[in-house]
Amino acid sequence: MKKALLIALAVAIAALGLVACGGSDDSSSDTGAETTAESTEQGGDTSGGAEAEGGSAGSGAVIDFETPEGSALAYTATEASAEAGTDTINFTNVQATPHDVAIEDEAGEEVGKTDVISEDTASAKVKLEPGTYTFFCTIPGHREAGMEGTLTVK
Ligand SMILES: [Cu+2]
């Protein structure tokens, strides 16, 4: 009889122990899940070396030139400005007198010009770098009479 009681106690203790064990297992697995693998950060910023170049290649500023009504040998402005790149000269000659627009650099080298037109419009492409240029009419005598101005390119 005593043996039976001891066995019963042992079973009961074992059962308790299993329950306790199960409980501790749950909590330990919880804490185990919390200790996740720390992200191994790759140190050092390796970016910054790939900068795009040649952004001005696609620029295309438009430079407008016009003659005044009448027959004055002049443009409506003696100053113009543009951005460096391949720009477009748009010239409007409202006069019956033929004119054009030519651009020359500081060395006196012609870098572009429109057709000679009268009562018409003409345009031309011109590649410009930052600096100071001169625009003028190539018809003999017109530049000397005042058909010229300064083109500032930035
Ligand atoms: Cu002219």
Image: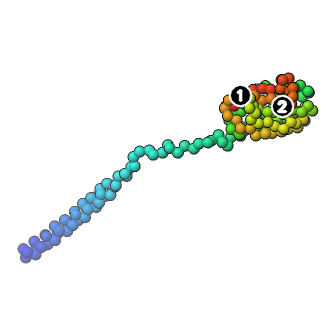
Q: Nearer the viewer, residue 74 or 11?
A: 74
Which secondary structure, mark 1? loop
Q: Earlier in the sequence, mark 1 or mark 2?
A: 1
Q: Nearer the viewer, residue 98 or 15?
A: 98
Q: Look at the numbered disc 2 and say if its residue's Cβ is closer than 8 Å to ligand 1.
A: yes
Q: Nearer the viewer, residue 56 or 45?
A: 56
| Quadrant of the image containing the C terminus | top right
Residue 130, how many percent across, how many down? Answer: 66, 32
Which secondary structure, mark 2? loop
Q: Is residue 55 above or below residue 29?
A: above
Q: Amino acid at mark 1?
A: Glu
Quarter of the view holding residue 18: bottom left
What residue do we see at 27% from left, 58% from top? 28
Q: Residues within 10 Å of mark 2 (few under 14, many from 20)?
A: some
The residue beneath circle 2 is 138
Q: Is residue 46 left or right of residue 113?
A: left
Q: Residue furthest top?
A: 145
